[in-house]
Image: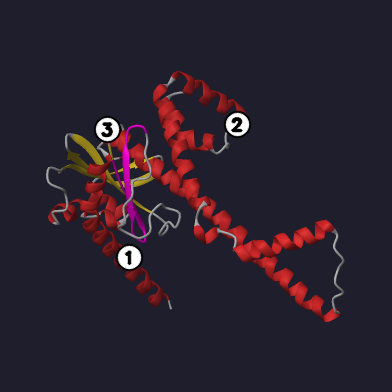
Amino acid sequence: MQCDDFREIADSYLSDELLIETNHDVIRHLESCSKCRRDMAARRQLRHQLRTQFNHASDLEVPHQFAKRLTLQLKDQALGRPRVVIPRMAYVGIAASLLLAATIGFIGFQRWRADQRNLIAWSNLTNSAIGDHRECALEHRLGPTIIDLNEAGRVYDRAFSNLASELTSEGSLPVGAQLIDAHSCEFQGRRFAHLVIKFHDQVASILVARTNGPNRRAPIAQAGDLVTPLKSDSYRLAYFQTSGHAVFVASGLDETDNINLARSVAPALVKHLQRAEQTLEARGLRAISRGK
């Protein structure tokens, strides 16, 4: 197994989705490749951090009063306490309550499943951004997938058009930072707008990708808010989002410089992305109106 083969199936390996024989191939490769071992450790850490944030989400906690009532009811049943005679009509209310509880439980389960899918999608997107920075900006291995940003704007995502000129015309880069390349590239099936920045003698990547809407499980609150909770052995990562796009800033800078770079470019990029999203939404509404 080669390193490229490992990277393509690393997430499937962590999710226990591979055949036993393939798992053995991965293990053998990890035993002989320190670089992939570091990459695997970073992926495990990322998943652990995301899972921790998911498990501690306040909107998924069981209400205290409900848990208390349920505990008392189960305790009464376990102790075999006498049943209270209930009028026949009261059974209608009990049945309705049980139906309501079952409905709430089903809705909660469906929401949990959606959150799990969202968590996996977010993890995959983050890993793809890190991989794109490494494979394209640092190792220059994505050449066959590279196209002009404006061409990518016509073919893939309108928001990619004029992205670089918008950034430079706004004067958003911090002092000492220089845009050295701007293109669109693809890593593991994910198409990015890729702005390559030279800052403090380090290469940094600003990576923009389309999403299916704001990610509630992403470790931020609102578009433009920035955090750096996700790290690999070699990179720093900052992130912000709009209603339809995710933006990653990945680099080997120290944490302060990486977050300052992200904060500097965020206002211009958010404005540009939101403008493109609003234009696309307006076109969609006009198309629906004509269809009527």
x and y percentages locating residue 3 in the rendered image: 42, 26
> In the rendered image of this protein, does residue 244 appear above or below residue 257?
below
* Most common secondary structure along the magenta stretch: strand
107 with respect to 52 (left or right): right
x and y percentages locating residue 21 in the rendered image: 59, 26
Residue at the (69%, 67%) spot, across then down: 101
Q: Which residues are magenta?
A: 233-250
Q: Nearer the viewer, mark 1 or mark 2?
A: 2
Residue at the (22%, 36%) spot, across then down: 203
Question: For residue 284, what is the image quadrant?
Answer: bottom left
> In the rendered image of this protein, does residue 103 appear above or below residue 37?
below
Query: Tag 3, which secondary structure?
Result: helix
Residue at the (50%, 59%) spot, across then down: 58
Residue 83 seen in the current view: yes
Q: N-terminal of the two: label 1 or label 3?
A: 3
Look at the image and say whether residue 236 sits in the magenta stretch. yes
Q: Which residue is mark 3?
A: 138
* Distance between the alpha carbons at the discs numbered 3 and 2: 32 Å
Q: Nearer the viewer, mark 1 or mark 3?
A: 3
Look at the image and say whether residue 288 sits in the magenta stretch. no
3 with respect to 253 (left or right): right
Q: Which residue is mark 1?
A: 280
x and y percentages locating residue 59 in the rendered image: 51, 61
